[in-house]
Image (cartoon, grey):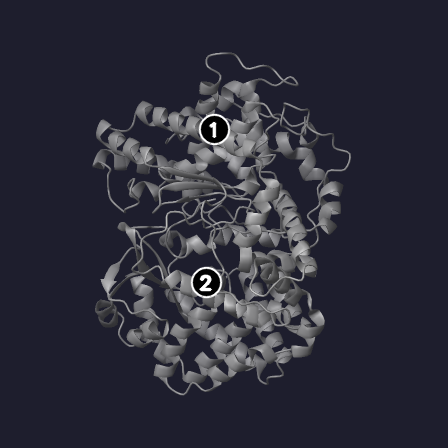
Amino acid sequence: MKLIAICRTIFLAGLLLISCSPETAYSIESANAGIPRAPVGLGVDLGNMDSSIRPQDNFYRYINGRWLEETEIPSDRARWGSFDELREQAEADVLAIIREAVEQEAEEGTQSQKIGDMFRAFMDTLRIEELGIQPMTLDLMTIDTLSSRSGLAAYFGYSHSLRQSGPVAIYVGQDLQQADRNITYATQSGLGLPDRDYYLNDDDQSKEIRHHYLRYIQNLWAATDWADGDRAGERIMKLETALAEIQWTRVENRDRQATYNRMYVSGLTESASGFDWLLFLDHAGLDIEELVVRQPTYLKGFAEIWGDFDLDDWKTYLRFHLLRRSASLLSSDFDQAHFEFYGRVLSGQEEQREREKRAVSAVENSLGFITGKLYIDRHFPQEASDRMDEMIENLMIAFEQSIKDLEWMTDETKKEALAKLSTFNTKIGFPDVWRDYDCLRIRPDDLIYNLRNTARCEYVRNISRLGQEVDRDEWHMTPQTVNAYYSVTMNEIVFPAAILQPPFFDVEADNAVNYGAIGAVIGHEISHGFDDQGRRSDGDGNLRDWWTEEDEEQFQARAQLMIDQYNEFNPVDDMYINGELALGENIADLGGVNVAYRAYLNSLGGEEPPVIEGFTGQQRFFMGWGQIWRIKFRDEALRRQLITGPHSPGKYRVIGILSNMPEFYDAFDVRPGDEMYRNEEERVRIW
């Protein structure tokens, strides 16, 4: 749920908008068939619970056990849970908006025309089949004409405007050390597998995936009627493995200090000589004197090894990545090959998502804020915004109290922490200023043309930030996104409208559950400003060390304890959670639940909360947290999550956090010998 300000997390974070349509309502209803609706006021679905499990032993299964037993992951999904259910509904709402646009005879250039024609182009499978590889002809010819190293360097730069993969990615974002301006970033890129570990690990699963990856490359060659698919696969795998060997790990890439290396372009050409960086930047449309290099050793290593591969190797690599990025948008042979690898092999999906659902995603990816504005008009009640304003204010007060009460932090560092908290900005529901899409031209009969235009418009919008004031009205998630984020350079928390629904937020539910659910999510995002990386920036969003040496040591000791705890969790096979990779999210979870609990108690004004359906207010609070993390993964998707994702699987976001909270022990009478029990000296408390 976190937005990191660098390495394009502004454009990546997101974690993952998963879509829906009315046709999938059966999946949702069948998953909950026969389960009674939650009583008004409770906010917890008792039908999802397994009362045969003691909450003191496994609170996650106590709250979600029946749901876990009875729910089947839809065949077109890699995972299914509370987030996915809401995303399903949000997509159904957006589909209704799109269908209205399709039915109109809208004037050229209007929002309705763009929405309708993008959808039509994606759904026109007859036209897509007729065209085959033809939409890629011009780009493939451009690659074929490359005849020199300088031409290759220029193409690497130019390809950014088409969102094509290359060994080095560049983008413009806020300067981590001077957050009132924008700067260019350069970062490692260029792999077709999700992470360097897929190339380097020697376990059977990784070997099997590499085998299927080679087959995928061969299938794309066959679909294009090119010869020597086997040879192409060998070349691409060898080249990408060489890149993987010099790439930084995901844990290393989390370090905001290590990945902030501002230098002049002349310094880059000296430290990473062997590659024509000036030509690369020029053809990327960037006339700059300085930039931030996220992984200096990678760029140096790339400049050294790129000459180890001949021009034909690189051209084969470029052809593959051009096809890979577009395969799901081309004729069925390309589309099916893409799904077989990325859907079935890497994620465990049993079948491809319906065309209409994928068309909605295409519209959303290109025109998300246009559909978002229409979504808000229909699906965001003012009451939800008002209640959120109140809860956020209460959470901020509670976080301030928590900082002041910290026994391990000195007054000097507390003063800085409170100053940062006081500058937090909050955005709820939808933007005050909507993004325009005036640059975008959309045709009803040319999907690749539309998406190429989308890429170019987005790229121009991104690099045009240079020399401009930072846009503090900008949102990096659409209102219909079921998610939330914290931006370190903006020092702001953002809650799109679509997450403000049950089970996260229920206007009819008792406050206890809302504080345990959306309240803890709010607290989670606030805590990101004070997690192991967020704490390195100040209230202005600038990377600055405001910690005393003593407090730094105290924080690190507590963080290490949390790393050690999560390293012990074994979700699947012989794979464990990477406590270092997940540290930021786990700290945010722990801080979020702690501060939300304090805010809930504050909201009672000293009064004892009512008992509802036999549960005390304190118990209902923790039940609210437990139920929002119900989720089931296919094994393939879970393995991928453990390698690439900073979030712990849902089960461990519940039991891992609550086992550290004495307030939970009091609410459910957890005692020594219970499985949820930890000795006091083993419990983590940071914020």
Of callouts 2 and 1, which one flags the residue occurring earlier in the amino acid sequence?
1
Quarter of the image where the C terminus is located: top left
Q: Is residue 15 above or below residue 67?
A: below
- Where in the figure is residue 222, as x and y percent of width and height? 63, 79
Residue farthest top in this picture:
607
Q: CA distance from mark 2 to mark 1?
A: 35 Å
Any part of residue 537 in sight: yes
Q: Amino acid at mark 1?
A: Met
Q: Amino acid at mark 2?
A: Glu
Q: Residues within 10 Å of mark 1 (few under 14, many from 20)?
A: many
Say which residue label 2 marks. 458
Q: Is residue 436 above or below residue 595?
A: below
From what the image shows, is residue 106 above or below residue 628?
below
| Residue at which label 1 appears | 391
* Position of residue 33 measured from the top left corner of the image (x, y, whole percent): 76, 37
Disc 2 on helix, strand or loop?
A: helix
The residue drawn where x is 47% and y is 83% is: 142
Residue 546 placement: quadrant? top left
